[in-house]
């Protein structure tokens, strides 16, 4: 399996296995894991990762953001449960039943619309808004219960569960800690009212990656595991009980190496001027590959185990860096944009911090033209391009 060694991402399934197993150990047996595989597994490519999770890791629950992603999963032979976390236009209700997908329900009127358009029972988990203020039934608990009860009587609706989403489960702040606890208490209170009144719910769930670590409760039947599965931190400032292994490395090639004289300008906008004679390398990745332009004059890459500073603006497909400290560098050599070599590591979280964002956005943003090279048991098993 050959691929163009220009800009590529290596996705290591061994790391995903490690992260999943460590997380399972941490939360124990009472809560099942729902792997969050939206946005093509946070940029890691669903067509390699999801079949692996089902067939080798025995994962039975998956969450996606929309019906296209759900459809892709069914097409690749995923037979486990799939929950769509976001909105599906009610006209698409027949697809939900045809594909046997569980839909998040945003509010009572939406459930009515779904029921109207459906040609069979649409399975739903009702979102409960406990403080994220994004989607879900909201208001006091009795009102929410009343709406759930009404939803449960709709002709073409099967109300199978309720869930909520934490807003600050990864925060170190004491006030945020109280906020998260209140979110959990609210959905548990709603679940209790349902139970008391005989409204059966198969699944009540409220834990995300961070929630499962810092606010574990066996009242959550599922933990919706996203970022930690891929080896990143919900918040890099907050420690985890185990060290997740980043599953993705992002690499590119050295295209040209040359010496430039003191005073030479580099790249668009002339934002870098060589302070002395500098050895400069041109690297074959840019913002069109998902390497943020915000890293201009700020970022670093690893070449031959050493950190090299980016000089000047990141272009669409290329950027330059100072390789004065590297002796035998030549075109075709490998540059690590995200990953480890020797004693040096650059994580997606590091890039996110430099670019003023989070690691999540960096891995999701590695673009479609970057092939994903899949590794398992240390060997290359596939090279995937986004369809
Ligand atoms: C994305 C998402 C998750 C996963 O969050 P992580 O922080 O990546 O674990 C869980 N639940 C919902 C509703 C989400 O939208």
Image (cartoon, rainbow, N blue to C red):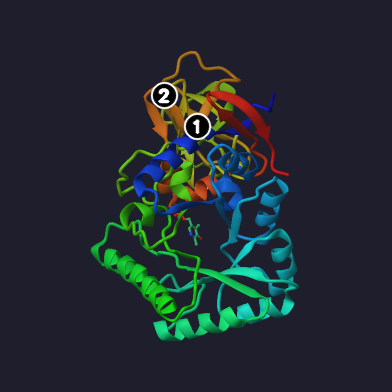
Residue 12 or 263: which is nearer the viewer?
Answer: 12
Q: Quarter of the image holding residue 193? A: bottom left
Of helix, strand and loop, which one carries label 1? helix
> In this rendering, would 123 be left or right of 196?
right
Residue at point 69%, 43% (across, down) = 386
> In the image shown, does 79 or 343 lie closer to the viewer?
79
- Name the image quarter holding residue 46: top right
Residue on which disc 2 sits? 306
The image quadrant where one finds the C terminus is top right
Is 344 positioned to the left or the right of 134 in the image?
Answer: left
Q: CA distance from mark 2 to mark 1?
A: 26 Å
Residue 357 visible within the image: no
Tell me where residue 45 appears, x and y as whole percent: 61, 43
Ligand 1 neighbours mark 1 (CB distance < 8 Å): no
User: What residue is at 69 percent from the left and 65 percent from the top?
Assistant: 96
Label 2 crowd (10 A; few <14 / some 14-19 / many >=20): some
In this rendering, is residue 210 above or below 134?
above
**Residue furthest to the top:** 328
User: How many numbered circles does the render carry?
Assistant: 2
Q: Where residue 276 sits in the image (x, y, percent)?
A: 42, 26
Residue 357 % position (x, y): 45, 53
| Most foreground residue, 311 or 203 | 203
The reply, left or right, for residue 211 in relation to residue 222 is left
The residue drawn where x is 70% and y is 55% is: 71
Where disc 2 sits, the SS reads: strand
Q: Is residue 29 above or below residue 176?
A: above
Q: What residue is disc 1 on?
A: 14
Q: Quadrant of the N terminus?
A: top right
| Left or right of 298 in this view: 176 | left
Earlier sequence position, callout 2 versus callout 1: 1
């Amino acid at each position: 399996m050959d691929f163009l060694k220009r800009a590529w991402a290596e996705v290591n399934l061994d790391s995903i296995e490690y992260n999943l197993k460590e997380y399972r150990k941490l939360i124990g047996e009472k809560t099942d894991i729902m792997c969050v595989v939206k946005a093509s597994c946070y940029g890691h490519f669903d067509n390699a990762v999801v079949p692996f999770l089902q067939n080798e890791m025995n994962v039975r629950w998956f969450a996606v953001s929309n019906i296209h992603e759900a459809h892709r999963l069914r097409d690749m032979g995923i037979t486990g449960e799939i929950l769509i976390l976001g909105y599906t236009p009610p006209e698409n209700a027949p697809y939900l039943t045809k594909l046997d997908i569980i839909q998040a329900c945003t509010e009572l009127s939406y459930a009515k619309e779904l029921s109207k358009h459906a040609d069979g029972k649409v399975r739903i988990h009702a979102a409960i808004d406990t403080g994220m203020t994004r989607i879900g039934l909201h208001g006091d608990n009795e009102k929410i219960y009343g709406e759930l009860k009404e939803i449960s009587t709709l002709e073409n609706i099967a109300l199978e569960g309720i869930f909520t989403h934490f807003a600050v489960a990864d925060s170190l702040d004491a006030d945020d800690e109280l906020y998260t606890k209140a979110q959990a208490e609210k959905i548990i209170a709603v679940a209790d009212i349902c139970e008391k009144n005989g409204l059966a719910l198969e699944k009540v769930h409220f834990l995300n990656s961070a929630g499962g670590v810092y606010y574990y409760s066996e009242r959550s039947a599922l933990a919706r595991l996203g970022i930690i599965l891929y080896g990143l931190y919900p918040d890099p400032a907050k420690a985890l009980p185990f060290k997740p292994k980043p599953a993705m490395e992002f690499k590119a090639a050295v295209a040209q190496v040359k010496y430039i004289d003191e005073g030479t300008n580099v790249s668009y906008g002339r934002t870098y001027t060589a302070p002395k004679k500098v050895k400069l390398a041109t690297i074959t990745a840019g913002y069109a590959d998902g390497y943020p332009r915000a890293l201009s004059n700020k970022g670093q890459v690893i070449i031959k185990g050493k950190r090299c500073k980016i000089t000047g603006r990141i272009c669409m497909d290329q950027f330059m860096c100072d390789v004065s400290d590297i002796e035998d560098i030549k075109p075709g050599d490998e540059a690590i944009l995200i990953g480890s070599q020797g004693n040096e590591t650059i994580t997606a979280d590091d890039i996110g911090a430099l670019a003023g964002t989070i690691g999540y956005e960096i891995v999701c943003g590695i673009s479609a033209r970057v092939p994903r090279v899949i590794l398992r048991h240390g060997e290359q098993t596939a090279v995937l391009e986004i369809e």
